[in-house]
Image: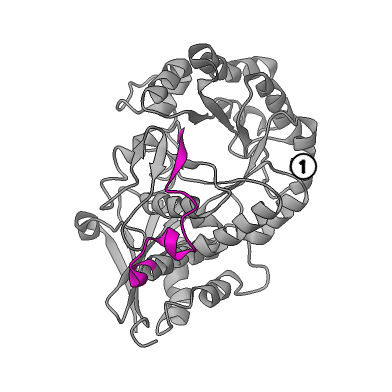
């Protein structure tokens, strides 16, 4: 126990990415594990140092399960993807990084072994700074920032974008053309004109590439049940692979199950917004989803994700980990996707892979011919670049 004792917990933030927080856990054996949190970075940082650190310092870093249980259930009323859950998630990822380093194996192997050495990727058609600076970029009449400004591209010519993705080996893509219409009614309704305008990018994709491209529709938890039902019905002819997060409250399992029964040919994917295995159990018991999506930084980390995947397997549902957050989350998600037997996709954003993700960490997953390939180094197999650490604001708790 002496060598694996936790001696320091450190958080790091860089000004150009205010949504992201990294956590490093150091042990007496000289190892450093890396985790990541996304959204509400200041709140998560406070949680880590004020509530988590006093419990963690001096403890054995190998005791991942009991540490996880303590951090995920600290008091009555605790739940959802709160700052507490995000802190627990980042710490859990760092502990698994330490475990893999200690054993000299990738995290996927430390979790119980690889189910596969590569997994199909789909490209979320976001731009270069989507979500990372505190808000989503508004798409207007501006010029593209670069060749992978995919959010702008799908609003202008989604068919041309689909051809570009196919040329790089991607055979699945995700877009969200209905989002601009939600604000007018607070997501309570969508007009026929708005519906037709939102459908046009999907039709352009089918006209350009036919069935060579799977298409996911992201609804970003913006809609009421009637509005979401109308959108799902309109999507049926283009045969979406899934419709993601259609309702404004994705823990409303009764309404979600009603939607799934009403439009069975528009498969539901849910939900990156949920935290903890109980929320996913309720989703599955209600028959409210076809695909289980989770975000490692919001659901409870790798330990909780493994339990959610087991629940999904018991209900014969595949899992698909979320990206669109930060590079460490992507790396950890890939380890999970290569381990979990029912994983079917790893989400990626080619714009961020080509730019700011690579500017923050030493190694990123290799994406070739539409597949994400295994990370081979011990632990997560990546670390913060020295330049990232040098410009970061650091807070530390130490024994």
**Label 1: few (<14), some or many (≥20) within 10 Å?**
some
Residue range corresponding to the magenta coloring: 100-123
Residue in front for this viewpoint, 68 or 140: 68
Residue in front for this viewpoint, 126 or 313: 313
Q: Residue at x 57, y 57 (%)?
A: 81
- Residue 106 among magenta residues: yes
- The quadrant where residue 290 appears: top right
Q: Please indicate whether residue 176 sits to the left or right of residue 246 in the image.
A: left
- The quadrant where residue 169 appears: top left
- Residue 26 among magenta residues: no
Measuring from the top left, give residue 254's x and y in whole percent: 79, 46
| Residue linked to disc 1 | 257
**Snapshot colouring:** one colour
**Residue placed farthest to the top in the image?**
207
Q: Residue at x 33, y 62 (%)?
A: 378
Q: Please indicate whether residue 396 sits to the left or right of residue 137 in the image.
A: left
Measuring from the top left, give residue 379's x and y in whole percent: 36, 63
Q: Please indicate whether residue 340 sits to the left or right of residue 359 in the image.
A: right
Residue 189, relative to residue 277: is it above or below?
A: above
Quarter of the image where the C terminus is located:
bottom left
Residue 348, relative to residue 114: is it above or below?
A: above
Q: Residue at x 35, y 46 (%)?
A: 365
Quarter of the image where the N terminus is located:
bottom left
Measuring from the top left, give residue 95's x and y in whole percent: 42, 69
Classify mark 1: helix, strand or loop: helix
Q: Please indicate whether residue 99 sits to the left or right of residue 191 in the image.
A: left
């Amino acid at each position: 126990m002496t060598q694996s004792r936790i001696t320091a917990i450190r958080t790091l933030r860089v000004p150009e990415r205010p949504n992201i927080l990294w956590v490093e856990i150091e042990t007496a054996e000289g190892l450093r594990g890396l985790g990541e949190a996304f959204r509400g970075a200041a709140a998560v940082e406070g949680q880590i140092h004020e509530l988590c650190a006093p419990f963690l310092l001096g403890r054995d870093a190998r005791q991942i399960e009991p540490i996880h249980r303590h951090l995920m259930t600290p008091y009555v009323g605790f739940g959802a993807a709160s700052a507490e859950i995000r802190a627990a998630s980042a710490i859990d990822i760092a502990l698994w990084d330490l475990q893999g380093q200690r054993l000299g194996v990738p995290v996927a192997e430390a979790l119980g072994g690889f189910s596969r050495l590569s997994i199909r990727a789909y490209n979320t058609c976001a731009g270069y700074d989507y979500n990372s600076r505190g808000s989503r970029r508004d798409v207007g009449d501006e010029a593209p920032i670069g060749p992978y400004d995919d959010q702008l591209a799908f609003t202008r010519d989604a068919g041309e974008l689909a051809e570009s993705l196919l040329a790089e080996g991607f055979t699945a893509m995700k877009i969200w053309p209905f989002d601009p219409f939600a604000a007018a009614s607070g997501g309570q309704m969508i007009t026929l004109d708005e519906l037709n305008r939102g459908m046009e990018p999907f039709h352009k994709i089918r006209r350009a590439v036919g069935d060579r491209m799977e298409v996911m529709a992201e609804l970003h938890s913006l809609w009421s049940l009637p509005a979401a039902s109308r959108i799902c019905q309109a999507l049926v002819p283009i045969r979406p692979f899934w419709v993601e997060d259609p309702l404004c409250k994705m823990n409303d399992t009764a309404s979600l199950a009603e939607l799934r029964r009403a439009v069975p040919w528009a498969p539901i994917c849910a939900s990156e917004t949920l935290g903890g295995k109980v929320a996913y159990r309720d989703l599955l018991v209600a028959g409210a989803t076809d695909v289980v999506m989770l975000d490692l930084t919001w659901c409870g980390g790798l330990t909780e994700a493994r339990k959610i995947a087991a629940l999904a397997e018991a209900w014969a549902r595949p899992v698909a980990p979320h990206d669109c957050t930060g590079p460490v989350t992507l790396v950890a998600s890939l380890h999970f996707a290569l381990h979990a037997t029912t994983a079917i996709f790893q989400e990626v954003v080619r714009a961020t892979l080509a730019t700011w993700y690579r500017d923050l960490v030493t190694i990123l997953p290799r994406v070739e011919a539409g597949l994400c390939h295994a990370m081979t180094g011990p632990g997560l197999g990546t670390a913060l670049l020295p330049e990232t650490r040098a410009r970061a604001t650091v807070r530390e708790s130490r024994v």
